[in-house]
Image (cartoon, rainbow, N blue to C red):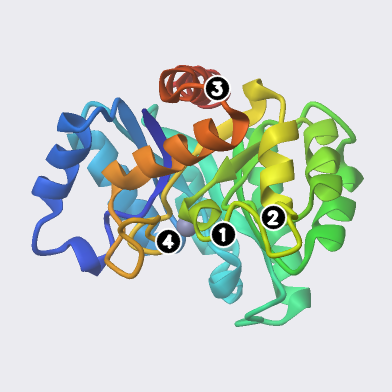
Amino acid sequence: MINTHTHIDFKEFNDDREEVIKRFFDGGGEKLINVGCTLQSSKRSFELARDNENIFASAGIHPHDADTVNEASLKKLEELAQHYKVIAVGEIGLDFFKNSTSQEVQIKALKLQLELAENHNMPVIIHCRDAHNDLINILKEYKTSNWKGVIHCYTASWKIAQEYIRLGFHIGFTGTITYYKDKSKLGNEPEIYRVIKNMPLNKILIETDCPYLSPVPERGKRNEPVFVKYVAEKIAHIRNTSFGNIEKQTSENANKLFNL
Ligand SMILES: [Zn+2]
């Protein structure tokens, strides 16, 4: 399994980081990408990647901290991005749910970091909440196809997913997909099941976003990288295929997209 979105540099792992990493690799984990969300966490992600063969890093500033994107921080991100173990720019994006910084500041920070990725021909890891139309419009300003990247922790509709796929993006799924009942009282399936069923297999990635969003049956506890197996299991269940098939295909997808 390749877990394409973890935050094991966070303080939640300060007491047992080495064991958490070991549990992932002992439990069927092949590679993981630790995702930067501030300049500091991008540096820590880089250090984890530098010191562990099968850990890779991304460098970027999350929309929550968009007001820290400036010439100086961009220059530092660019320096980190030169290292061969830093394989993407992210996580970047828009969060109009939390609005920790103004929408104007978020849009500016996103554009500057999209340009960084373009200049270095790197894939992007994108966080988007309550801002899909704005995000899609911004992406289309740059190009209307052949984007390299992932819309991470996807929870929106199949209609929106198709827009991203047309642009070239992969879609990343986290433990949130395990939070639903298979069918409602009316017999309907959750929309996210429709997304997962309809997705082209070569565009699916699995992730945890740990320490957050622990999948069932670990929901409510601290999330950790090895729990990505529950995400793969759920996708296999929804698509009526084997765990092995999802594991193999999502690993191929991650290797190819991020050139791991
Ligand atoms: Zn994240």
Tag nearer the camera, 3 or 1 = 1
Give the mark nearest the N terminus, 1 or 4: 4
Q: Is mark 2 within 8 Å of ligand 1?
A: no
Q: Position of residue 230 (x, y in %)?
A: 38, 43
Circles 3, 2 touching at the beta carbon (< 8 Å): no
Question: Which of the two residues, 164 or 193, is positioned nearer the viewer here?
Answer: 193
Q: Which residue is mark 4?
A: 39
**Disc with the residue nearer the chain's start (3 vs 2):** 2
Amino acid type of disc 4?
Answer: Leu
Q: Position of residue 146 (x, y in %)?
A: 79, 26
How packed mark 4 is, by other alpha carbons closer than 10 Å (few <14, some 14-19, many 20 or more), is: many
User: Which dot marks residue 253?
Assistant: 3
Q: Residue at x 36, y 31 (%)?
A: 85
The CA span between labels 3 and 2 is 25 Å
In the rendered view, would you say 246 is above or below 147?
above
Residue that badge 2 annotates: 190
Task: Identify the image quadrant of the C terminus.
Answer: top left
Q: Are marks 4 and 2 in contact (CB under 8 Å)?
A: no
SS of the residue under disc 1 = loop
Q: Residues within 10 Å of mark 3 (few under 14, many from 20)?
A: some
Residue at image position (36%, 28%) is 1
Give the mark nearer the N terminus: 4 vs 2.
4
Dots 1 and 4: beta carbons under 8 Å? no
Q: Mark 3 against mark 2, which lies toward the viewer?
A: 2
First in residue order: circle 3 vs circle 1 = 1
Distance (Cα) linking label 1 and label 4 = 35 Å
Can residue 9 be spotted in the picture? Answer: yes
